[in-house]
Image (cartoon, rainbow, N blue to C red):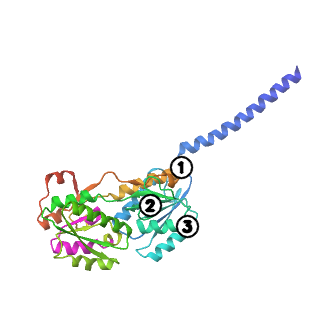
Amino acid sequence: MKKLLAFGLSLLLLLSLVGCGATKSGATGATSTATGEKKAIKIGIVQIVEHPALDAARQGFLETLKENGYEEGKNLTVDYQNAQGDQSVLQSIAQKFSSAKLDLVLAIATPSAQAMASASKDIPILITAVTDPVEAKLVNSMDKPGKNVTGTTDMNPLKEQFALMKQLVPSVKKVGVIYNAGEVNSQVQVAMAKKVAADLGLTIVEATVTTSADVLQASQSLVGKVDTIYVPTDNMVVSAAQSVVQVANKNKIPIISGESSVVDKGALATIGINYKKLGKQTGEMALRVFKGEKPQDMPIESQKEFDTVLNKATITLLGLTVPDDVLKKATFAK
């Protein structure tokens, strides 16, 4: 009987110890969840050039991460590199990132995305401000990327933009388009612009550039030849948008742009991408990658709501009357 009792007590003691161990382990996990601790993340951000739209996309991306518990200086390390429009520098940045131990790379704009995708087939790459990821050979398709690349597209609502042009400048017949012929996203937009213009009975007059220094001369070449100017989301042209605005406003030529930062600088209007919102949307995709989703299985996303933005000073300068239905849904440039 004594032996039996001793055995029973030993068994109870053993079970008690096991139970204590389980409780301790469980408590650790509960504490981690309760405090919202996140695994430390290291990311790279590569941007082709500085201009307000691309900067806003980057800011929106980081804002989303911060709102979800990933903050620089705490559990998030960010290596931000800007190529300042230099392709050789861009390639060096991509190579550097490919050999670094990064959890993810954000590539902003088509050239950045192409350089990064060529440099690494393993690191998860999120893209943003890329017009046509398929044409740029970054993914197999929009729905099934099939590679280590996914993200958001800034494909412009060109039909709506040209319709706005017709509403604001009913007499328009010829539209000048300034773009970098070497940039894939610009080639795609110009091809689309030609189709849209043809449907509206408009003629496209092209002015191409190879450097940002060419933008002023390209703008001047359109004076006397066009009724309006369309500025697509071309990285090189947008970075020198002030030159286009200077020439156009001096010669009373309305500018419709692909995004709002050009309107802030003096273009007439846009119906376009809100790049901060696009960046935030890309940040939401990054959170999914952190949780284990694979880029190859995540469809490319596009912005579903576009902003109509007008410039009051330019409306006055050009002496235009804006229809009430446009005014109702518009905001005004800063």
- Judged by depth in the image, the label closer to the viewer, 2 or 1, is 2
Q: Which of 22 and 171 is in front in this view?
A: 171
- The amino acid type of the residue labelled 3 equals Ser
Let me know if residue 241 is in the magenta part: yes
Q: Position of residue 18 (x, y in %)?
A: 73, 35
Q: Is mark 2 on a helix, strand or loop?
A: strand
Circle 2/circle 3 CB separation < 8 Å: no
Q: Mark 3 points at which residue?
A: 98
Residue at the limit of the structure toward the top, as seen here: 1
Circle 2/circle 1 CB separation < 8 Å: no
Q: Is residue 301 left or right of residue 248?
A: right
In the picture, which quadrant includes the C terminus? bottom left
Let me know if residue 42 is in the magenta part: no
Q: Which of 277 and 225 is in front in this view?
A: 225
Q: Is residue 76 left or right of residue 259?
A: right
Q: Mark 2 points at which residue?
A: 127
- The region drawn magenta spans 239-262
Disc number placed over residue 291 in the picture, else none:
1
Q: What element carries label 3?
A: helix
Q: Is mark 1 on a helix, strand or loop?
A: loop
Tell which circle, 3 or 1, labels the residue nearer the N-terminal end.
3
